[in-house]
Image: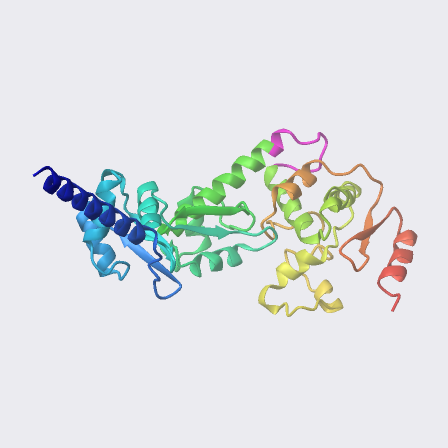
């Protein structure tokens, strides 16, 4: 009798150990999904059984009960979270369980780049499949009203950065975040500005920052470029900066700027008009804003590109002409 009990106990242990080994093997074996990555959706307020069935319906699992069993054995049942998830093809059931446990739902992201325009910013949102589109047919003025701005031109009012968000976040919410980030950073920088700058308000500083952003090829030169433009404003000189002319040309710009373009008057042609253009011409980054508000102390009033992204700065027209001959006419 004792021997029989021992045999039953031994057999039971073998069965339990075999079952455990089988479950462990299942838990750590790659699911080998097709294609190489897969988007899945777990609905809100789903029970463990419902989640397992959703995974079967979406082709992740072949049947639900083994996944349910390991979730119960590991006491993860009550911690599984709804959301959108991206799975690579070699994810294991255990890794999947951990992802659902920690709520590692798929996030969307969008990067707004310094020097790009608002039109390019809108295009980024339209082409991002994680963004829910709600403003496709709205004008700039309507969009600005939605984000809480009293202005009618959106250029330069949004902060360039990478923003992370839950999938299906509406586009206007992302614009609000970017808009508020720019207003916050700009006003903080404005409060700490160097005294005596020739700006009437922070918006004019933002306009200058956008020009600096477009003119700068080498980051360390931003304060010097700002210093040149500040000197020109103080002397009553025209800014004569090509990026503003290009912006004013709009769709007519084909990659080349000619003498006739410099002579064609638009509100943004700083060769034909004094002072700053009416609005920013792009999204400036924080470094360009800081340069506009803390320009280098220099006597330079000219600069010319050297061909490597850097510039030669000059204090006089004669010096500038020599730099042009050296760097622009040397061929």
In the picture shown, does residue 38 fall above or below 319? below
The verdict on residue 191 being magenta is yes
Does residue 155 appear in the picture of this structure?
yes
Residue reaching furthest to the left? 1
| Quadrant that contains the C terminus | bottom right
Instruction: Point out residue 218 in the picture as x, y percentages from the top left corner.
Output: 73, 50
Q: Residue at x 42, y 44 (%)?
A: 147
**Magenta region: which residues?**
189-201
Q: Residue at x 71, y 37 (%)?
A: 198
Residue nearer the viewer, 244 or 14: 14
Instruction: Point out residue 72 in the picture as x, y percentages from the top left corner.
Output: 21, 42
Instruction: Point out residue 103 in the picture as x, y percentages from the top left corner.
Output: 33, 43
Report the magenta stretch's main SS: loop
Does residue 46 appear in the picture of this structure?
no
Q: Residue at x 73, y 63 (%)?
A: 262
Q: Is residue 320 left or right of residue 1?
A: right
Q: Is residue 251 left or right of residue 56?
A: right
The verdict on residue 139 being magenta is no
In the picture shown, does residue 159 fall above or below 308? above
Residue nearer the viewer, 210 or 1: 1
Residue nearer the viewer, 245 or 46: 46
Image color mode? rainbow
Q: For residue 130, which quarter of the picture?
A: bottom left
| Quadrant that contains the N terminus | top left
- Numbered label tally: 0
Residue nearer the viewer, 185 or 252: 185
Instruction: Point out residue 95 in the picture as x, y percentages from the top left corner.
Output: 35, 49
In the picture shown, does residue 30 fall above or below 149? below
Q: Is residue 5 left or right of residue 136?
A: left
């Amino acid at each position: 009798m004792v021997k029989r009990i021992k045999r039953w106990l031994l057999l039971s242990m073998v069965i339990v150990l075999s079952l455990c080994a089988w479950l462990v093997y299942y838990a750590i074996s790659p699911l080998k999904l097709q294609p190489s990555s897969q988007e899945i959706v777990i609905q809100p307020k789903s029970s463990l059984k419902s989640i397992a069935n959703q995974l079967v319906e979406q082709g992740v699992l072949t049947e639900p009960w083994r996944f349910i069993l390991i979730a119960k054995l590991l006491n993860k049942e009550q911690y599984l979270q709804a959301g959108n998830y991206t799975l690579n093809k070699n994810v294991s059931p255990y890794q999947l369980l951990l992802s659902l446990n920690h709520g590692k739902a798929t996030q969307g992201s969008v990067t707004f780049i310094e020097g790009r325009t608002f039109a390019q910013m809108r295009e980024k949102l339209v082409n991002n499949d994680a963004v829910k589109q709600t403003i496709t047919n709205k004008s700039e003025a309507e969009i600005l009203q939605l984000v809480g701005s009293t202005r009618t031109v959106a250029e330069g009012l949004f902060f360039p950065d990478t923003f992370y968000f839950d999938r299906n976040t509406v586009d206007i919410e992302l614009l609000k975040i970017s808009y508020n980030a720019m207003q916050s950073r700009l006003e903080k920088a404005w409060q700490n500005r160097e005294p005596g700058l020739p700006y009437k308000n922070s918006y004019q500083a933002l306009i200058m920052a956008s020009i600096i952003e477009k003119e700068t090829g080498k980051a360390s030169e931003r304060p010097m470029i700002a210093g040149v433009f500040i000197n020109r404003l103080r002397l009553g000189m025209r800014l004569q900066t090509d990026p503003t002319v290009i912006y004013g040309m709009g769709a007519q710009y084909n990659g080349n700027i000619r003498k006739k373009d410099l002579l064609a008057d638009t509100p943004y042609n700083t060769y034909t008009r004094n002072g700053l253009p009416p609005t920013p011409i792009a999204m400036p980054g924080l470094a360009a804003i800081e340069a506009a508000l803390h320009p280098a102390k220099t006597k330079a009033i000219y600069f010319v590109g050297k061909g490597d992204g850097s510039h030669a700065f000059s204090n006089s027209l004669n010096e500038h002409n020599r730099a042009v001959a050296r760097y622009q006419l040397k061929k």
